[in-house]
Amino acid sequence: MNSKQFELLSSSKVLVTGGAGFIGSNLCEALLDLKAEVVCLDNFATGKKENLAAFQNHENFTLIEGDIRNLEDCKKAVAGVDFVLHEAALGSVPRSINDPITSNEVNISGFLNMLVASRDAGVKRFVYAASSSTYGDSEALPKIEDKIGKPLSPYAITKYVNELYADIFHSTYGIDTIGLRYFNVFGRKQDPHGAYAAVIPKFVIQFMNHESPVINGDGTYSRDFTYIDNVIQMNLLALTTSNKEALNQVYNTAVGDRTNLKELAQLLKQYLAEYDPEISEVEVKHGPNRAGDIPHSLASTDKAKTLLGYDPKYKIEAGLKEAVEWYYKNL
């Protein structure tokens, strides 16, 4: 990763939608460290004000409380902005199955509002959070960007539609976009609480409470778990690349390794037991498979490495160790 490439951000204004969320707040912090001017748009439906606490009074940081479903809020947020990092969305496959209408309103109508506002404001580049769920029922491994299957959930449909809209907005209106298909991102600030908590923070808090985590299925489903710092690198590369061929593309944002859920639980137990030896005795349980889940997820990162110069620094073990330390210090 060439940090000199990121120097242009020190004279740029960047909007991070969903900036109070897990990924968004980490991106805000990284951009501020690079001396960018940062605007955060969030309605705090899933984002948290405590995620902004470390920099909420920073002279280069502005918080706008608003909703991407409201076009006027989007227009206000993009005023004078050079780049957009669009992270705002309602995540979670189960949430979308339980409430497809709200997922559609936020993830599709909200996305379209942000594209329209960005187009009208003359934004230089629109980088957005896409999803590995777009691969759907494709059984091919590793996942390669131009080979996808049929979506398996309302959430997956919404994220695929985002890619279609971004492509049309480039070809029709000339706005440059890059989509980043996130693969099971984890790390500091990821919320362990709530019905739709991701598997890693959920297992962490259960182990810390000496409660048995429940694996969906027999534990052989596997994922390309991706530490937050790899995701930050991809977003910064997407914002600053000068390679014209790299624009108006979608990229896997992952490591290129996969870990099954049984292995994940054992790694977490091992790392957490260094802080609390009793955790090594906590039993892991199994439940039914979850509707809409893809059995296996493994990304090819060749395209990102070739066109963006992506160089992921964190394999799952190193990322889990840092994440576990953060949870122990902050929960």
Image (tube, helix red, strand yellow):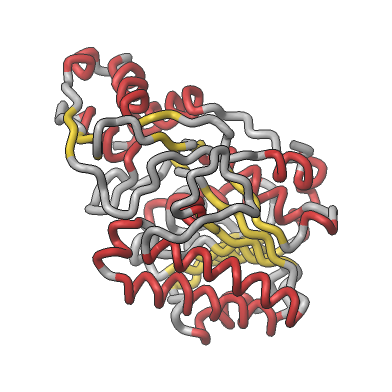
User: Where on the picture, by quarter, is residue 173?
Assistant: bottom right
- Res 121 → quadrant: bottom right
Residue at 37% from the left image edge and 66% from the top image edge? 154
Residue 236, visible in the rendered structure: yes
Up the image or down, 215 lies above or below 10; here it is above
Quadrant of the snapshot with the C terminus: top left
Against 147, residue 17 (above or below) is: below
Above-or-below relation of 166 to 20: below
Could you tell me residue 148's position as x and y percent? 55, 55
74 or 183, which lies in front?
183
Position of 12 compared to 276: left or right? right
Residue at the spot 54% in from the left edge and 43% down from the top edge: 140
Whole-percent x and y of residue 79? 65, 78
Q: Is residue 218 above or below residue 165?
A: above
Please indicate whether residue 217 sits to the left or right of residue 141 in the image: left
Residues 98 and 193: in front is 98
Count the marks: 0
51 relative to 310 in the view: left or right: left
> Residue 307 at what x, y percent from top left?
78, 47
What residue do we see at 19% from left, 42% from top?
Answer: 288
In the image, 291 versus 188, the foreground residue is 291
Q: Is residue 90 left or right of residue 193?
A: right
What percent of the width, then of the height, locates residue 9?
A: 74, 55
In the rendered image, is residue 52 in sight?
A: no
Q: Quadrant of the N terminus?
A: top right
Q: Residue at x 49, y 28 (%)?
A: 316
